[in-house]
Amino acid sequence: MGGTVRWGVLATGGIAASFTTDLLQMPDAEVVAVASRAAASAEAFAERFGIPRAYGSWADLAADGGVDVVYVATPHSAHREAAGLCLEAGRAVLCEKPFTLNAREAEELVALARERGLFLMEAMWMYCGPVVRRLVELVRDGAVGEIRSVHADFGLVGPADPGHRLRDPAVGGGALLDLGVYPVSFAQLLLGEPDRVQADALLSPEGVDLNTGMLLGWDSGATASLSCSLVADTPLTASVSGTKGRIEFPRGFFYPEGFVLHREGREPEEFTVAGRRDSLQHEAAEVMRCLRAGETESPLVPLDGTLAVMRTLDAVRDRIGVRYPADEHPADEPVTRV
């Protein structure tokens, strides 16, 4: 594939609007179609962004042969259905995080993409940013020695309304999947899948986690202390400590402007990158690079890594007692609500 990459956008919410805005600023990207289950929503989105085709059906977008790749921006409770529909129709897919509600759904999507030889990637924008990529390079080059400790937190004062989606277990509510996916992904980017998972949480009356602490352990001796919250405005910082030094991220570690490397006997070294810290263009550029190179998986956001994160999130939910209807009912089976 060469030249302009033609994007379809599936869903019309806030993240879809942010991603589309960034895509339209990229000379080698074109947004050619948008879909929503509500035709009026798709048409309004198309008019807002100058998109030529608007569909009131996900299936119609998936069947559009003029689309090279679909960006799935639905709530995560619909990721399995939406991404699966697109893959079944032969479309490459970039699917928002968290990838799915559970590891089983994630495994189904990955198996489908690999069977069809189609590109699939989780939209873990943190992995694609230049600052985090520089962090990975430094760690791999031994800048902090052997990693012994990772810290990361993501907490905010979320909605109090019990009817909000973040409080609804039927759609994967709670702090863990919306916010905790970032600290877990940060730790596993550097250390891989943990050998042990411990967790504790404050649960809501609806049965979702409001405040969760996680302790991950590796046979190497490394540990990760992670947290997420819908009831506390936490620092949103991260750090990586090793046998030869440490790296500290300021507030907003998941879309950082830079970090500071501390090593014994040296002055602190600050690493920064110019440009918008909240840009989604980095992940879009990686998708387009892969498509042009004929790659079906991104080395920056590998599918095996996505599956490992989903297994950890499942393990955390198991420890804290959070279960979703989708855990008992696969996506292709109807869920009976009483």
Image: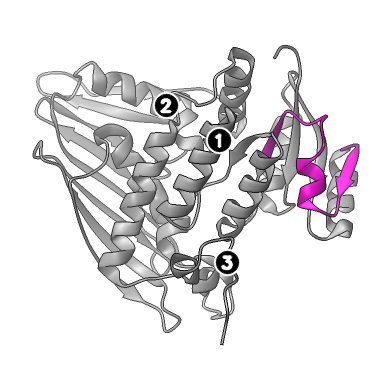
Image coordinates for residue 271, horizontal then vertical, percent: 36, 22
Q: What residue type is labelled 3?
A: Glu
38 horizontally vs 99: left or right = right
- Find residue 123 and report its horizontal and vertical position in percent: 54, 39
Specify whether residue 62 is painted magenta. Answer: yes
Check the picture and name the quadrant holding the C terminus: bottom right
Position in image of residue 184 (x %, y %): 33, 47
In-front residue for pair 12/266: 12
**Secondary structure under the numbered disc 2 in the rendered image:** helix
Pointer 3 residue: 333
Label 1 – label 2 distance at C-alpha:
29 Å
* Labels 1 and 3 touching (C-beta < 8 A): no
Where residue 160 appears, x then y in whole percent? 51, 78
Closer to the camera in the image, 115 or 148: 115
Residue 101 highlighted magenta (yes or no): no
- Residue drawn at x 10%, y 19% is 265
Residue 255 in view:
yes
Q: In this view, does 149 lie to the left or right of 273?
A: left
Instruction: Give the vertical position of 22 relative to 225 (above or below).
Output: above
Q: Give the range drawn in magenta.
A: 51-71
Kindly identify the amino acid type of the residue bearing the numbered disc 2. Answer: Val
Label 2, residues with CA under 10 Å away: few <14, some 14-19, many ≥20: many
Residue 113's label in the rendered image is: 1
Q: Which residue is drawn at 31% across and 73% down?
A: 321
With 270 as the anchor, is 274 left or right in this view?
right
**In the rendered image, which quarter contains the N terminus?**
top right
Name the residue at 62% across, 54% down.
81
Q: Residue at x 38, y 66 (%)?
A: 232
